[in-house]
Amino acid sequence: MNLALPALVPALPALGAAATLATGRRAPGLARPLAIVPVAVSAVLALVVALQLGTGQTLDAATRLTPTGGPDIALGIHLDGFSSLISVLVGLVATCVQVYSTAYLKDDPRYPSYAALVSLFTAAMFLVVYSGDLIVLLVGWEVMGICSYFLIGHHWETADARSASLKAFLVTKLGDVPFLFGIFLLGADAGSFRIPDVLTAATDGRLGHPTLIALLLLAGVAGKSAQFPLHTWLPDAMAGPTPVSALIHAATMVAAGIYLVARLLPVFLLSGAALVVLAVMAAVTMIGSALCALAQDDLKRVLAYSTVGQLGYMAGALASGDREASVFHLVSHGAFKALLFLAAGVVIHAAHTNSISAMSRMPGLRRRVPDAYWTMGIALVALVGLPPFSGFFSKEAVLTAAEHAANGEALTNGLGPASAVPQTAGWIVLISAGLTALITAAYATRLFLVAFHGPAAAAGAAAPAAAAGPEADAPYSPEVDEADPATAEPPAMRWPLWVLAVPTMGFGVAGLRSDWLPALLDGGSLRPVPVTAVTGTGLALVGVLLAYGAWRSATARLGAGRPARAAEGRVPGQAGAPAAEVIVADPGRTLLGPLFGPARHGFGVDRLYSTLFVRPVTAAARLVRFLDREVVETYVRSGGLGANLLGRAVRLAQTGNAQTYLSALLAGVVLLAVLVAV
C-alpha cells in the first residue's frame, strides 16, 4: 500500500480547516466547498485504505520525530481492521455533518470558523485512529478537546453555551491529567511509545505496573467518553449546534476513549482489578443514564443520556474482554446516533423548540417532517435493539460477551487468557446491560410517542392550564435557532438522514451474513446466541410495552380532562428553559414514580460536585484573593509608604541656599571633631 493514502486521510481535513479559516472572511462563498470536499475525499480515501488493507492484515510504519533521552517519539501509522472500520465511520458521519451544516447554519455569520473547526475535529479523530504512537495519539486526543470547547460554545453570546463549553473542557481535562501520566508510565515500562511495541510488552508480561497504568488511562477514558463519574459534561453540551452533537456523539470525541481501550486491551487484561473497576463504571453509567433519559423533556438531552448509556455498553464489553463486540457496537451506534441527532435537528427546526412536551401539542408535526419522522423511527428501533437492525446484532454481541465472561469463558480472541477476566466483571455487565436494555426501550418508545403522537387535540380542548408544577426548572439546553419554522427543510438536511439510515438498517446483517466483519476484526464470532438473543429482545419488548401502556393510560386520563397541567398551546422560547413545562401525557412519570424528579436532574450529581468541589475551590480562591489584597499588598504598600515619607523628609532639607548647606557642613565637621577628640 502507498503510505501517502493513509497519510492524506487526516491531512486533507486539516488543510481544509486551514484554508477555510484563511479565506472565510474574504471569500465566504468558498467556505462550504472547502468544508465539504476535503472531508468527503478523506472519507473515500479511508474506504480505499480499508479495502486495500483487507481482512486479517496490519500495516505498521514509523519515522522518528525526536529523541527524548528515553523512549523516542515517532510519527507512525498502525492500521488494522479496527482502525479501518472506525475511520470509514468517521468519514461518513463527518461528511454528512458538513453537508447538513450548510443548511442548518445557512445564515450564521460564523459559519466559516464553525466549518473549519469541524474539519479540524475530524482530522484529529483520524489522527487518533491511525496513529501508531501514543504521543501522537495524545496530540489528536487534545486537539479534539479544544475543538469541542469552541464548537459547543459556538453560540457564545448565550450563557448556556458559554458554561457548557467551559464545563466540557474542564471535566475532560480533569481526566486527561492522570491519562497523561498513564501514557508516560506505559511508555517507560514498555520502553517505547509505539503501540505495537507496547502491545508486545504487554503480551510478554514486561509491564511493571499494569494496574496503575490501566487505572490512570481509565480516568482519561471516563472524561473523554463521558463515563461515570465524569459524565456530567455531555448532557449540558447540547447547547451547541445540533450537527456538532451528532459528530461528537457518533464518531469522534466520545468514541475516542472506547477506541483507545480496545486498542490497548492486552494491557488491561493484565489487571483484573482494572477490569472490575471498568465494569462497575460501565454498570453505573448504563443504568443511571438510562433512568435520566426516561425523565428528560429536552429532546437533545434524551439523546445525550442515551449516548452515555450506549458508551457504557461498549465499556462493559471491554470489561468482559471482548473488544470485537465493543467496536461492533461503537460503529452501529455511530450510525444510528448520528441519524438520531440529525433527525432531531430537523424536528427542532420545524417545531422551533427542543421540548418534546411542546411538540406533543403541535398537531401534524410528523406530517410536516416525514423524512425525520421515519428515519428517527428507524434509528430508535436500532437503539432499542430489535431485529434486523444493526443495534440488535451489536447489543446482542455485548450481552454474549458478558455472558461468556460471567461463565469464566471470556471471549478474548487470543489477546489473553479467558481467566484474565474476572467472572465478577462479567456478572456486573450482564445484569446491568439487561436492565439497561429494558429501560432503553422504554425511553425510546416514550420519546417517539410523546414527540410525534401526542394528543394535541385533547390538549388544545382542555381547560386552562394550572399553575407551574414542581418540574418548572427542568434541565433544558437550547441552542440559538436560526431557522424559519415556516420554511421547509432543504434537501441538505434531508438526504443525509437516508444515507445514515442505510447502515442503521443493514450494517449488522451485511457484516455477519458472510462473516466479513469478524474476519476484519479479531476473528471471533459475533453472531447472536439464541438464548441471549431471545432474552435481550424479550427485555426490549417488555420495555416497549410498558412505555406504551403507561402512555395510553396517561393519554386516557388527559382525554378525561383530569391532569391537564401544561400551559395551553405554549411553545417555550429558545433563550432558556421552559417556565412551566410539564409533559402532557408522559409515561416516564408513571414508570419512574418517585424517581422521576431526581432522574430529571441527573440524580443530583452536579449539585454534589458543586458542594464537594466547586464551592470549596471558590471559597479557597476568595481566601487567596483576600490574603493577596489585604495582607501581601499591605506589606508592599507599607514599604512603599515608608520610602515615600523618607523621600519627603529629605526633600525638605533641599532648600537651594548655599549658606545653609555650608552651615550644615561646618556643623557636621565640628561634631565629628568633638567626637574624635572625646
Image (cartoon, rainbow, N blue to C red):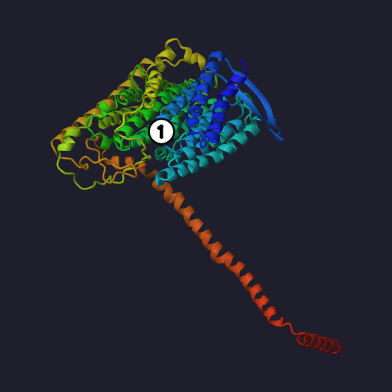
Write down the quadrant of residue 247 in the picture: top left
Q: Secondary structure at mark 1?
A: loop
Q: Nearer the viewer, residue 89 or 151?
A: 151
Q: Is residue 646 left or right of residue 416?
A: right
Task: Relative to 146, say whether 508 is above or below.
Answer: above
Task: Relative to 552, say whether 48 is above or below.
Answer: above
Check the picture and name the quadrant holding the C terminus. bottom right
Residue type for callout 1: Lys
Write down the quadrant of residue 126 in the picture: top right
Q: Nearer the viewer, residue 276 or 395?
A: 395
Would residue 349 be seen by someone viewing this image from the given angle?
yes
Tell me the residue that label 1 is attached to: 106
x, y (%) of residue 341?
38, 30
Would residue 224 be seen by someone viewing this image from the given angle?
no
x, y (%) of residue 505?
37, 18
x, y (%) of residue 215?
53, 36
